[in-house]
Image (cartoon, rainbow, N blue to C red):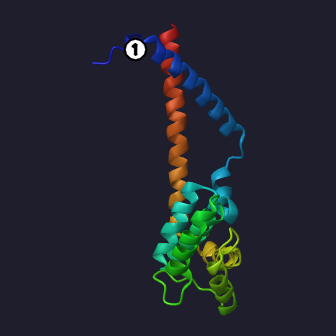
Amino acid sequence: MCKGLSALPSTCLERAKEMKVKLAHLADKQDRAPRHKEESLLQDFEKLLSSKHGVAAFRSFLRSEFSEENIEFWLACQDYSGTKSPGKLAPKAKRIYSQFVAVQAPQEVNLDSETREAVTVCVSEPTPASFSAAQQRIYTLMEKDSFPRFLKSSYCLEALRSLDAMNLCISTFINRCGVAWQQQEE
């Protein structure tokens, strides 16, 4: 049976109070933010790709359209371009090339022959920018072709519902913590 907050060690109560302050601050920020922040997140392609939940929803959508290789390639290029160690560039470049760029690659992306040739040359002496042109082509393809369909899809709606549910959980948690602390203080 639950003995209430008095049964908890004082360090737990202190940490819980700190968390309450942080969560209250977060809730206050959310209340002041535009009401449809989540909707704007999913309706701006760049913001979508900067969000873990946005990428997951978009990846699911692309999988349903049999074009998941586009987001996988884009993400692999993001990882590649952020590689700090020069010794890791060559193996990563070869992996990306063989997985996405080479003709008949397992997840071959749709690149024009000029871009494909440029990447092929760059892979022999890789730099952090070796895939930049190809990555930009795929980004543009996703932004102009797949993204508008995503916005009209059930995947986008489901992502919005999930964000709403997450916000509701946070609000409920904050409210319950507030009630519990008020009872503790009384």
Which residue occupies the extreme left position in the image?
A: 1
Which residue occupies the extreme bottom position in the image?
A: 113
Residue 174, horizontal then vertical, whole percent: 54, 29
Residue at (47, 80) in percent of width and height: 66
Q: Relative to 73, does residue 158 appear above or below in the rendering?
A: above
Q: Relative to 179, does residue 122 appear above or below in the rendering?
A: below
Q: Relative to 76, does residue 65 appear above or below in the rendering?
A: below
Crowding around mark 1 (Cα neighbors within 10 Å: few <14, some 14 to 19, many 20+) is few
Which residue occupies the extreme top position in the image?
A: 186
**Number of residue marks:** 1
Q: Amino acid at mark 1?
A: Leu
Residue 128, by quadrant, is: bottom right
Residue under pointer 1: 8
Residue 19, by quadrant, is: top right
Residue 169, horizontal then vertical, whole percent: 49, 39
| Label 1 SS | loop
Q: Can you see residue 67?
A: no
Q: Can you see residue 65?
A: yes
Residue 148, by quadrant, is: bottom right
Residue 57, horizontal then vertical, whole percent: 52, 63
The N terminus sits in image quarter = top left
Residue at (37, 11) in percent of width and height: 7
Q: Nearer the viewer, residue 103 or 159?
A: 103
Q: In the displayed structure, does residue 115 sit left or right of residue 172?
A: right
Residue at (54, 76) in percent of width and height: 94
Residue 89, horizontal then vertical, whole percent: 60, 67
Residue at (65, 60) in percent of width and height: 82
